[in-house]
Image (cartoon, rainbow, N blue to C red):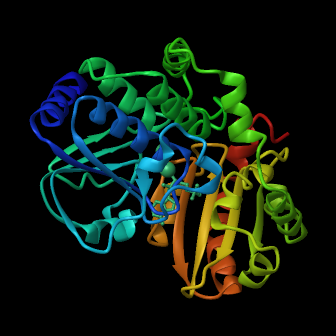
Amino acid sequence: MSATKFQEIGGILRTYQRFAILGHVRPDGDALGSQLALALSLQTLGKEVRVWNEDGMLEKYSFLPRAELLTKPPSTPEDFDVAIALDTAIQNRLGNTLAAIRSAKVWVNIDHHLSNPGYGDVVYVDTSAPATAEIIFRLIKSEGLPLDRDIAENLYAAISTDTGSFQYPKTNANTFEIAAELIRTGLDVGRLSQQLYENYPRRRLELLRELLRTMRFQQEGRVASFSLALKAAAELSVLPEDNEGLIDHLRSIRGVIVAVFFEELSDGKVRVSMRSKTEAVDVCAICQKFGGGGHTLAAGARVRGTLREVEERVLAEVCAKVESLKGTLDRTWRFNA
Ligand code: AMP
Ligand code: MN
Ligand code: MN
């Protein structure tokens, strides 16, 4: 099945000339690394490629090889043969890049989100993949597309960030085999990891201090949350990208099963990020109730309302779920003794 699908996508990549490679709003390492990797491979084949994201390249990922290729979309729409959405659960998460595509003969959707409804003409959604970049790697290998060190670094950064440094449960032997093959192209794991994890601006830690100040626990410590008000974000001069990964501090606490992060946005909505340590609590299902989506153990939503209102509504839903599973969780959740 995957071989046939890869052949179909490979055929499209070879046949056509003009490509737009798009990723989700508020991009992460997987979106940006997957976009750049596929773009570089296509460029090597002599294709014309645009690589767009609503937010453009983030400061913290600007060390990625050929990062300058990734830009915000132009205000004048362009015509393409093929538009490819990567790592994007629902089409409207492509944000304002959508309006920059005046036409595309074929829409390709490559992703690993459980909540992806399969939009587009050619769809490859593998929910077992720990990162979209892993699918891109397999596509490149199975179709004999170009793979060099620059492409490998982008794929490695994407896989490393989306697996929480090769820790999350979807990380498997195949993930390490792919990492090994990427490393053999000559990439320097130590240097790349330093760029990814030991190069944060000081304000990110000041933001963490503020978040920890608001930290609260419910359900006997099984549910942990913190929140960021617009005013506090402004006072600390934080960028949206600064908070990626901070929710992991909540998840790292013994006994916590669900971690929730609330971020007040300037459009009257609140961005909700949710993480779970067990499939018994499916945070994708909870976020879908609020119009969002994601994966079983990592999901999000944007919910209209004030910070307090959204916190109460969402936490009530999370607590009800955890409450309903209490007996089961205590028996099956080995870290929750
Ligand atoms: P985040 O908490 O922003 O890191 O997102 C966790 C996961 O949920 C990511 O894989 C996102 O792509 C997905 N996700 C986050 N927000 C939304 C949303 N509003 N709609 C659909 N999926 C989302
Ligand atoms: Mn992503
Ligand atoms: Mn991803």
Residue at 43%, 52% in the rendered image: 70
User: Above or below — where is 220 with respect to 305?
Assistant: above
Q: Is residue 128 left or right of residue 119?
A: right
Residue 271 rendering spot, x and y as whole percentages: 59, 71
Image quadrant containing the C terminus: top right
Q: Which residue occupies the foreground of this view, 288 or 319?
A: 288
Q: Is residue 197 left or right of residue 166?
A: right
All told, the count of numbered labels is 0
User: Above or below — where is 100 with respect to 30?
Assistant: below
Q: Which residue occupies the foreground of this view, 288 or 145?
A: 145
User: Above or below — where is 231 with respect to 114?
Assistant: below
Image quadrant containing the N terminus: top left
Q: Which residue occupies the foreground of this view, 24 or 112?
A: 24
Residue at 65%, 38% in the rendered image: 164
Q: Which residue occupies the foreground of this view, 106 or 304?
A: 106
Residue at 59%, 84% in the rendered image: 266
Residue 254 rendering spot, x and y as whole percentages: 85, 44
Q: Quadrant of residue 29?
A: top right
User: Above or below — where is 221 with respect to 171?
Assistant: below
Q: Is residue 9 left or right of residue 150?
A: left
Residue 171 rendering spot, x and y as whole percentages: 56, 28
Residue 150 rendering spot, x and y as whole percentages: 48, 29
